[in-house]
């Protein structure tokens, strides 16, 4: 998978994270904050082999 940096969070210091990447497979990779709230994870019913991350609203502008 080839990743192309689309944007880092302009308000995050010093790392510009969360970060958004476009892949060469017609998908997106989102680097964000770990969601570890048990209640939230239970509500999402995340299957084995998947995970979720949290990003701020201000990052949505960088999606197509």
Image (cartoon, rainbow, N blue to C red):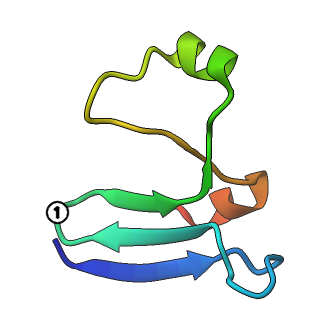
Where is residue 54 shown, x and y percent of the image?
64, 46
What residue is shown at x 65% (from left), y 57% (from top)? Answer: 60
Where is residue 61 shown, x and y percent of the image?
66, 63
* Residue labelled with disc 1: 25
Disc 1 residue crowd, few under 14, some 14–19, many 20+, Cα 10 Å: few
Quarter assignment of residue 47: top left
Please tell me whether residue 27 is drawn above or below residue 9 in the rendered image. above
Quarter assignment of residue 2: bottom left
56 relative position to 27: left or right: right
What residue is shown at x 39% (from left), y 61% (from top)? Answer: 29
Whether residue 42 is visible: yes
Q: How many marks?
A: 1
Quarter assignment of residue 38: top right
What residue is shown at x 68% (from left), y 62% (from top)? Answer: 59
23 relative position to 12: left or right: left
Element type at mark 1? loop
């Amino acid at each position: 998978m080839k990743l192309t940096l689309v944007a880092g969070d302009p308000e995050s210091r010093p790392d510009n994270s969360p970060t958004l990447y476009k892949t060469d497979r017609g998908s997106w990779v989102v680097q964000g904050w770990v969601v570890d709230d048990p209640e939230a994870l239970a509500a999402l019913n995340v299957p084995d082999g998947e995970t979720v991350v949290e990003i701020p609203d201000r990052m949505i502008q960088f999606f197509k």
